Structure formats: structure tokens, C-alpha cells
Amino acid sequence: MDTLTRSGLAEAIYAEVGLSRNESAALLEAVLERVSSVLETGESVKISGFGTFLIRQKGQRIGRNPKTGVEVPILPRRVLTFRPSQVLKARINGTTPANGGKE
């Protein structure tokens, strides 16, 4: 099982769009930087036909060290979640989306 990397994405942009390798890498970096900076502010990022990146606020809770059984407080934090679109789910499962491809 291979993993798609930054350089793999930049190479795909180079092959598909026809920009130079440097321009393709710069375009990818600009997109990733924009997505990251929007998520940093707590806003969601929705890419139609792909999915939505969301920031969730989790409250403080008590956890337990599985090795020792000692209770430990887990501090409040923000977590990044991804919710795939129906189109992406259908593609992964090789089916047609229930909503006709519209999200």
C-alpha cells in the first residue's frame, strides 16, 4: 500500500496542469498553507465533492493510564476531523452517490 505524499501531489499537478515542477510545488504549498491557516482560525474547509475539514473543541475529561490504571486529567483541546462527502464515499465503495453526485 503506497502513500500519496506532497511530492507525489506536486508531480501530479505537474503532469496534469502543465506547470513547471517548481510552480507545481509552489501551487501545492500555497493551497496547503491556505487550508492550514483557515483551520487555525477555527473555521471549516469544505472541498465540494471531496469532504469537509472541521475543528472541534473537546472539553476537559478524566482519562486513565492503561498501563497503571492511574486517573489523569486530559486538558481541553481542539481536534481536526475530516468528514468525507457522499461523492468520495461512493467513489471509494465503487457505487453511485445517493444524491446524484450533488453535495
Image: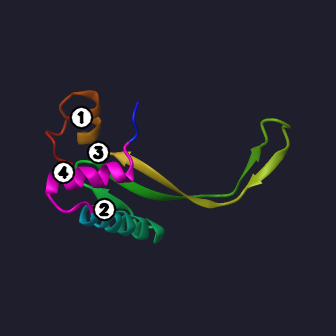
Q: Earlier in the sequence, mark 4 or mark 3?
A: 4
Q: Which residue is drawn at 29% across and 32% down?
A: 92
Foreground of the two, 74 or 9:
9
Which numbered marker is on residue 91?
A: 1
- Which amino acid is tagged 1? Arg
Find numbered disc 4 in the image and state the secondary structure of the residue it sits on: helix
Left or right, 12 with reference to 60? left
Q: Earlier in the sequence, mark 3 or mark 1?
A: 3
The residue positioned farthest toward the front in the image shown: 21
Q: Which residue is drawn at 41% across and 30% down?
A: 1
Q: Earlier in the sequence, mark 4 or mark 2?
A: 4
Find numbered disc 3 in the image and state the secondary structure of the residue it sits on: loop
Which numbered marker is on residue 47?
A: none
Foreground of the two, 18 or 88:
18
- Numbered range of the magenta stretch: 4-21
74 lies above or below 70 = below
Q: Where residue 29 sits in the image (x, y, percent)?
A: 35, 65
Distance in Å between CA atoms under marks 3 and 1 = 10 Å
Q: How many labels does the image show?
A: 4
- Which amino acid is tagged 2? Ala
User: Can you tell which of label 1 and label 4 is closer to the viewer?
Assistant: 4
Q: Earlier in the sequence, mark 1 or mark 2?
A: 2
Q: Residue at x 35, y 52 (%)?
A: 7
Check disc 1: other Cα within 10 Å, few if <14, some if 14-19, many if 20+.
Answer: few
51 lies above or below 44 = above
Distance in Å between CA atoms under marks 4 and 3 = 26 Å
Which numbered marker is on residue 25?
A: 2
Q: Main secondary structure of the magenta part?
A: helix
Kindly identify which residue carries mark 4.
15
Which numbered marker is on residue 85?
A: 3
